[in-house]
Image: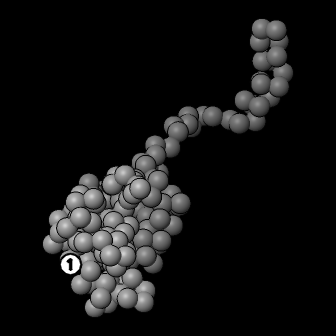
């Protein structure tokens, strides 16, 4: 008994179809069983015969087509490293990294224009979201706060 169609990947369906035909099943029955067209079964069989008898390369998944990424791996790593440092080091007034800021630095330093909306998605795919640094009062004194927590707070806190 065959596995349910949804449990198989496209590549597995192609390999299974070729194997079934090579085992003697007629292509029209294989197509019906796998819920594909008979023409596809013949096409896969032809690809297997021409390119992949030894290694099944003719049936392997092909890389997706589409526009190549604007940043190569080295550039992407560099950009991600920039985000570990402060935005003020790159000439911005505040410490917050935003997609438009990242886009402007990429354009200045690498000469690659990127749309901030696309860049937002690109950053999100890599687990980076815009972070707002916590606001701290200028008058904040960590030593005074620590002393208050150590001495005054225990007397105030409910037990």
The quadrant of the image that shows the C terminus is: top right
Determine whether, in the image, residue 102 is placed left or right of residue 85: left
Q: Residue at 45% of width from left, 78% of height from top?
A: 74
Q: x, y percentage for residue 107?
A: 30, 71
Q: Is residue 71 visible?
A: no
Q: x, y percentage for residue 85?
A: 53, 61
The residue lying toward the viewer, choosing from 31 and 154, is 31
Q: Quadrant of residue 154?
A: top right
Residue identified by numbered label 1: 43
Q: Residue at 53% of width from left, 60% of height from top?
A: 84
The quadrant of the image that shows the N terminus is: bottom left
Determine whether, in the image, residue 154 is placed left or right of residue 71: right
Q: Residue at 36% of width from left, 87% of height from top?
A: 52
Colour pattern of the rendering = one colour
Q: x, y percentage for residue 155?
A: 82, 12
- Total marks shown come to 1
Q: Residue at 42% of width from left, 48% of height from top?
A: 130
């Amino acid at each position: 008994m065959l596995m349910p169609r949804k449990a198989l990947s496209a590549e597995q369906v192609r390999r299974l179809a070729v194997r079934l035909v090579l085992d003697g099943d007629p292509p029209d029955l294989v197509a019906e069983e796998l819920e594909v067209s008979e023409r596809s079964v013949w096409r896969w069989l032809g690809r297997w015969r021409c390119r992949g008898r030894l290694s099944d390369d003719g049936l392997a998944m092909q890389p997706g087509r589409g526009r190549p990424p604007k940043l190569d791996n080295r550039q992407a790593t560099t950009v991600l490293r920039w985000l570990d440092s402060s935005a003020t080091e790159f000439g911005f007034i505040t410490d917050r990294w935003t997609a438009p800021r990242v886009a402007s630095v990429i354009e200045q330093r690498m000469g690659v224009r990127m749309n901030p909306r696309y860049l937002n998605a690109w950053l999100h795919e890599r687990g980076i979201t815009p972070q707002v640094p916590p606001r701290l009062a200028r008058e904040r004194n960590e030593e005074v706060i620590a002393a208050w927590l150590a001495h005054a707070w225990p007397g105030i806190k409910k037990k």
